[in-house]
Amino acid sequence: DISLSLLFQQVIVSANIALTSWSSNNTVTLAALELLSGLATLHFDSQSHVDCRDAVQWVCDFIETQAHQKPHLQTKNLHTSIVAAFRTLLIWIMEHTHLLAHENCLSSILRVIEFGITGSFSKLEDGKVVYKEDKESHPISGRVKDIAEFTLYCLMERFGSFPSACGAATT
């Protein structure tokens, strides 16, 4: 139904506006993330796949932006909003498996997971790559690291076992 699809689109855009414009207000941020989490449980036609990718990209952008706050702004409330954003992200990717088939979407998801676990990126803005053995781990908080690791665990648990040990034909 086109009216439901438009409503879905409008609510996602409204939640994004709340996340970007009111990111310093923890109550608004948590409400917007809760709204996005609820929307993730809805399933529409294939046209909404773009809206789903947009929602996930906005959540990834929110996590990255919040995680890059200056150290004196790194508060318990900020980390709570990042943890809530990871939970929202997890709901989206578990409910909409098609998101992982989109290269940019998957790349964004893995990028924020990596940052959540280590506090830095392997692929730098200048195109250089920092390998794991050369990388120091400095996550912004233990809670953020734990939820990022859990998100990675869920991804691997749900999607990382193909093909099975018996071969692709048995999966």
Image (tube, rainbow, N blue to C red):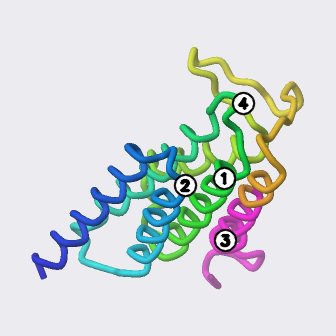
Dots 1, 2 in contact, CB < 8 A: yes
Res 73 quadrant in image: top right
Say the numbered circle drawn on residue 77.
Answer: 1
How far from the left and from the top, in percent, is residue 114? 70, 44
- Within 10 Å of disc 1 (Cα), the crowding (few <14, some 14-19, many 20+) is some
The disc label shown at residue 26, or none: 2
Residue at 69 percent of width and 23 percent of height: 129
Q: Which mark is residue 72?
A: 4
Q: CA distance from mark 2 to mark 3?
A: 42 Å
State if disc 3 and disc 2 touch (CB < 8 Å): no
The percent coordinates of residue 38 (x first, y second) are 43, 77
Residue 37 falls inside the magenta stretch? no
Amino acid at the residue labelled 2: Asn
Point 46% across, 51% down: residue: 105
Q: CA distance from mark 3 to mark 4?
A: 46 Å
Task: Answer with mark 3 or mark 4, whichever residue precedes in sequence.
Answer: 4
Task: Determine whether the residue tagged by mark 1 lies in a helix, strand or loop.
Answer: helix
Q: Which residue is mark 3?
A: 163
